[in-house]
Image (cartoon, helix red, strand yellow):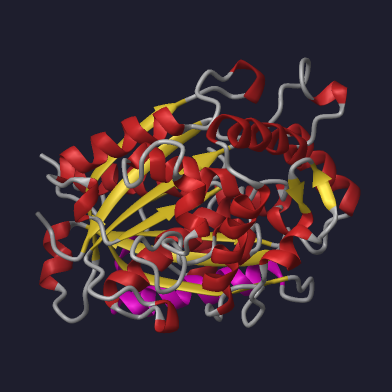
Amino acid sequence: MSKGLAIVGIAEVPTKRDPERTRWDILLEVCVGAVRDAGIDKNEINAVISPNPMAQPEMQNDMALGKIPDVLGLKGCRDICIANAGGTSNTNCLRLAQELIDSGQANFVLIPHTTVQSDMPPADLINFFATAPLDKQWEYPWGVSFNGSMGLITNRYMYETGASQEQMAAVTVGLRAWAAMDPMSIFYGKPLTLDDVLESRMVSTPLHARECNLLADGGGAMVVTSHEIARQMGDGRHAYKLGHGTRFTSAAPFTREDIFFRESYRASSQDALKQAGMTIDDIDLRQIYGAYPFTQCSALEGYGAVPENQGAIAWAEGRCGPGGDLPCTTMGDAIGRGHTGSGVSMAFYIDCVRQIRGEAGERQIQNCNNVIVTTSGGSGMNTCTTVFGSEPR
């Protein structure tokens, strides 16, 4: 029988571009911070499961081959592992951690992530983000980049739903409004207007520069345990995992039938909500990691939170941004936080915990007890949806 999983400790550093802040600087700060936040001794950590720091081979080897327990002196550590599923890597780390907890191999698991992209040559970054999510035979040779692929999908989404450029730009305005209130965002204190978005240079029709991701540096860590231990820990509200669902679409956009991921959002969220014994109407906050504006719209449609083809309208009406009745993605997604590789999804889970604890400052959603989080990997190869609550079920 599953013992459940609860996130009981979190820490992160502000997202920014700072090559002087090394990967180990970040990693040590967030690991120590998460353990302290959990209120446990570091030697109570029984395993370290890390998302793969993509495009950073030296750090990948350090993390995969066990350097973190040695550097931190985790005397109770029994195992280490590294997971790579792109943007869903942290989701898989949580699932692997739950397996260790359910099997009795661990009471507390540390999940750390770090990414520094500002010290990488621009040509290497461009090549990595062009080749990693695209088919090497049928897409990449014809000049399709990540932004190019997402631009094509966005164009199709606008055609099928009737969404205007102004409505799509409103998604970025809303995400940046959340980010402007988040001290951890690279865009803290920097909201945008519709004109700011629409007057920025065109990158890949219909995507403007402001609708694309800024590559940045960041890091975060979580400490997780079982529901039972979390309850025994007493003080503070924890984020209890209540339900989970996944769907795979395809590795490359050209083979994909679920073009907007709408059906995978629908199926994975239905599974997660059923396990949690909830409906989408029970959810107080929707956290959607899609990295591009159309995903914020199609996820709402897939969840059943708004009618199909109405996602962009909800954002344009201000329902999903600060003060709206349908708050979404309060950490700003990669558009508002800065893209830190696989670590973007780490920021989603940390923000989920902050919201449930009531620690999100200006961004706080009142009475935030139930949160749905969806992460996606690659160019949208999969959707992994989890429901978290302030109380175990």
Q: Quadrant of residue 117?
A: bottom right
Q: Which of 315 and 175 is in front in this view?
A: 315
Residue 161 in percent (x, y) is at 53, 35
Q: In which quarter of the image is the N terminus?
A: top left
Q: In this view, does 138 lie above or below 319?
A: above
Residue 116 in percent (x, y) is at 71, 62
On the question of residue 9 being in view, the answer is yes
Q: Which residue shows up at 18% across the image and 50% down it?
A: 4
Asked whether residue 34 is drawn in magenta, I would say: yes
The chief SS type of the magenta part is helix
**Left or right: 335 in relation to 135:** left
Asked whether residue 332 is drawn in magenta, I would say: no
Q: Which residue shows up at 73% across the image and 58% down it?
A: 215
**Left or right: 103 in relation to 337:** left
Q: Which of 325 and 69 is in front in this view?
A: 325
Q: In which quarter of the image is the C terminus?
A: bottom left
Read off the magenta span: 22-49
Residue 17 in percent (x, y) is at 75, 70
Q: In this view, does 202 lie above or below 318?
A: above
Q: Which of 301 and 10 is in front in this view?
A: 301
Q: Number of numbered discs present?
A: 0
Q: Quadrant of residue 28?
A: bottom right
